[in-house]
Image (cartoon, coloured by chain):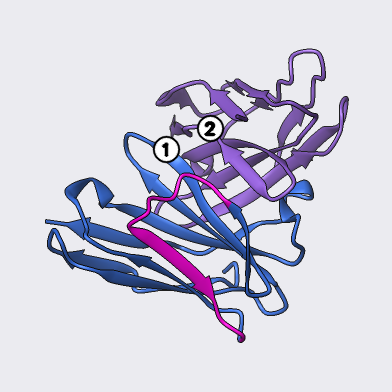
Chain colours: A purple, B blue
Amino acid sequence: GDSVTQMEGPVTLSEEAFLTINCTYTATGYPSLFWYVQYPGEGLQLLLKATKADDKGSNKGFEATYRKETTSFHLEKGSVQVSDSAVYFCGGGAGNMLTFGGGTRLMVKP
Amino acid sequence: DSGVTQTPKHLITATGQRVTLRCSPRSGDLSVYWYQQSLDQGLQFLIQYYNGEERAKGNILERFSAQQFPDLHSELNLSSLELGDSALYFCASSVASAGVKTGELFFGEGSRLTVL
């Protein structure tokens, strides 16, 4: 079946550092790809998405590009802030099922 | 605030018991999804309902069942509880049946179940 693999955390960075969280998706077709963010004590929120190859999703300074050849959707941000500390989930979906990776906890220190 | 309401927020019960988790989707959303988040399994899709009908099934145990009522709220029933069922259970909603294609799933804050 479909699966999502993302890098394990925790990832600890200093403020203003560059962030990359890797994500790859395995599926029979070409799913839509997403990044969700979960802040402490809250549910998941859609951060950004891409519905086809070469699409770039962006929001709040975060970016991810849908690479068709590798079905990858790596999350990047040029300069992280303390407020970005959260758990980030990569997800892929087609039809009615959205499959998530295991989540990557990001901790940003001042 | 996502507009998705889940109750109860916390629940502590004993092994062998049965509990019901409730979810009210965003106004206008017809699809409801249930996910289980545990430390060792990550976020697992359980089941989806659309306008009262089951649409997709994931890794849901036979001891678990769900339904969506005419007013579109949904309930997840967990029975014969085991220690391993301790987890955070999320409900999400979307407008369409194939909500995942657009990625517009709106999640509630979750119900944390602790089985002792």
Please tell me whether residue A78 is drawn above or below residue A99 in the rendered image. Answer: above
Q: Is residue B90 above or below residue A47?
A: below
Q: Which range of residues does the magenta coloring cover?
A: B57-70
On the image, numbered disc 2 is attached to which residue?
A101
Query: Looking at the rendered structure, which numbered label has been put on residue A13?
Result: none
User: Which residue is located at x 66 percent, y 57 percent?
Assistant: B105
- Give the residue number, with chain letter if any, for mark 1: B42
Q: Is residue A94 left or right of residue A17?
A: right
| Image quarter in which the C terminus of chain B is found | bottom left
Label 2's element?
loop
Could you tell me if the residues under marks 1 and 2 are in contact, i.e. CB atoms within 8 Å? yes
Chain letter behind tag 1: B
Residue found 60% across the figure and 67% down from its top: B2
Picture quarter with the N terminus of chain B: bottom right
In the picture as drawn, the residue positioned furthest to the bottom comes out as: B71
Vertical comparison of A42 with B76: above or below = above
